Image (tube, helix red, strand yellow):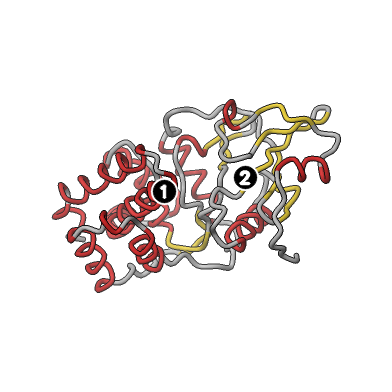
């Protein structure tokens, strides 16, 4: 597929590729970002998505499209259209809840994902952490952040326990409860990596909930629960650093104070739990 630099506006995409569709939900009413929207023609609904980071490489967005093409409809929405900066996927009818599914149901969903054929590109966390450090507000580059980054650079990423295709943004808002079962949306961070990294990155309420999920997954995947939990905890400082760095960069890009609040909360977690988090 040929990439072009002249990205189209939403109105141009609608008039050129979806003239028979009407917009039935805008970002304000649907929870989508940017100029993304929900379209309808007859009984069919599509979600037209805009790349959330216009300054990011187009290859990142194209990779998400390829990930969706790679996955079965039992896990993700089917992609139907792509042009630089825009993608359309089938709308998933269902409910997005404010809490995660029961840990056994979620473990089964992740196990099914991890048994798909790999995407073909690996997740590398250290370059992302270094990129976040470079792109954030220089006034926010604290000695503590630098020490954490240097510690991870010295340690290196944990050796994978089991490689698989990962979603890497599993939280309640990215899970649709359909009549046919659970489905995952928003695959922009997907790639191949350690299954324990996925479990470490799930947005749980606390470590008890994460431990329950890990044990349920271990039983499903025939992995010794203590071994898997130890590997999950090895990945936790990497995940926390990713979260903090992402929030810092989003604040730098948007000026939205909520991102500073979220970043500060993650830094507090790292400082408060540094002995337990870094001891693995």
For residue 167, side relative to residue 126 (left or right): right
Q: Nearer the viewer, residue 69 or 215?
A: 69
Q: Which mark is residue 222?
A: none
Residue 1 position (above or below residue 207): below
Q: Nearer the viewer, residue 247 or 227?
A: 247
Give the image location of residue 274, x and y in percent: 16, 54
Residue 227 position (above or below residue 254): below
Give the image location of residue 203, x and y in percent: 38, 42
For residue 131, side relative to residue 22 (left or right): left
For residue 142, side relative to residue 200 (left or right): left
Reading the image, the residue beneath label 2 is 76
First along the sequence among labels 1 and 2: 2
Q: Residue at x 32, y 38 (%)?
A: 209
- Determine the secondary structure under disc 2: loop
Q: Nearer the viewer, residue 71 or 180?
A: 71
| Quadrant of image for the N terminus | bottom right
Separation of disc 1 and disc 2 at Cα?
Answer: 26 Å
Give the image location of residue 55, x and y in percent: 54, 57
Reading the image, the residue beneath label 1 is 250
Give the image location of residue 214, x and y in percent: 36, 47
Q: Nearer the viewer, residue 207 or 278?
A: 278
Using a 10 Å C-alpha cutoff, classify the residue at mark 1 as few (fewer than 14 neighbours), some (14 to 19) or many (20 or more). many
Which residue, as the protein is rendered here, is positioned at the far right? 20
Residue 67 visible, this angle = yes
- Determine the secondary structure under disc 1: helix
| Quadrant of image for the C terminus | bottom left
Q: Quadrant of residue 41?
A: top right
Q: Residue at x 66, y 28 (%)?
A: 25
């Amino acid at each position: 597929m040929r990439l072009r630099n002249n990205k189209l506006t939403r109105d141009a995409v609608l008039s050129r590729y979806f003239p028979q569709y009407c917009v039935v939900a805008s970002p304000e009413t649907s929870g989508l970002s940017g100029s993304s929207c929900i379209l309808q023609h007859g009984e069919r609904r599509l979600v037209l998505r805009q790349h959330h980071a216009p300054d990011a490489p187009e290859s990142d967005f194209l990779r998400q499209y390829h990930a969706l093409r790679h996955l079965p409809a039992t896990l993700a929405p089917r992609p139907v259209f792509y042009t630089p900066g825009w993608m359309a996927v089938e709308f998933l009818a269902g409910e997005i809840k404010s809490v995660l599914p029961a840990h056994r149901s979620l473990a089964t969903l992740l196990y099914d994902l991890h048994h798909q054929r790999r995407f073909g590109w690996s997740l590398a966390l250290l370059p992302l952490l270094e990129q976040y450090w470079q792109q954030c507000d220089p006034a926010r580059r604290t000695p503590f952040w630098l020490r954490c980054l240097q510690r991870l650079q010295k340690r290196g990423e944990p050796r994978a326990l089991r490689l698989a295709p990962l979603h890497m943004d599993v939280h309640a808002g990215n899970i649709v409860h359909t009549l046919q079962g659970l489905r995952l949306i928003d695959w922009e961070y997907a790639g191949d990596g350690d299954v324990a990294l996925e479990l470490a990155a799930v947005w749980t309420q606390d470590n008890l909930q994460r431990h329950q999920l890990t044990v349920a997954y271990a039983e499903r995947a025939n992995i010794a629960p203590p071994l898997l939990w130890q590997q999950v905890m090895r990945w936790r400082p990497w995940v926390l650093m990713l979260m903090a760095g992402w929030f810092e960069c989003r604040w730098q890009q948007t000026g939205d104070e909520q991102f500073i609040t979220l970043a500060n909360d993650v830094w507090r977690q790292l400082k408060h739990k540094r002995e337990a988090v870094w001891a693995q």
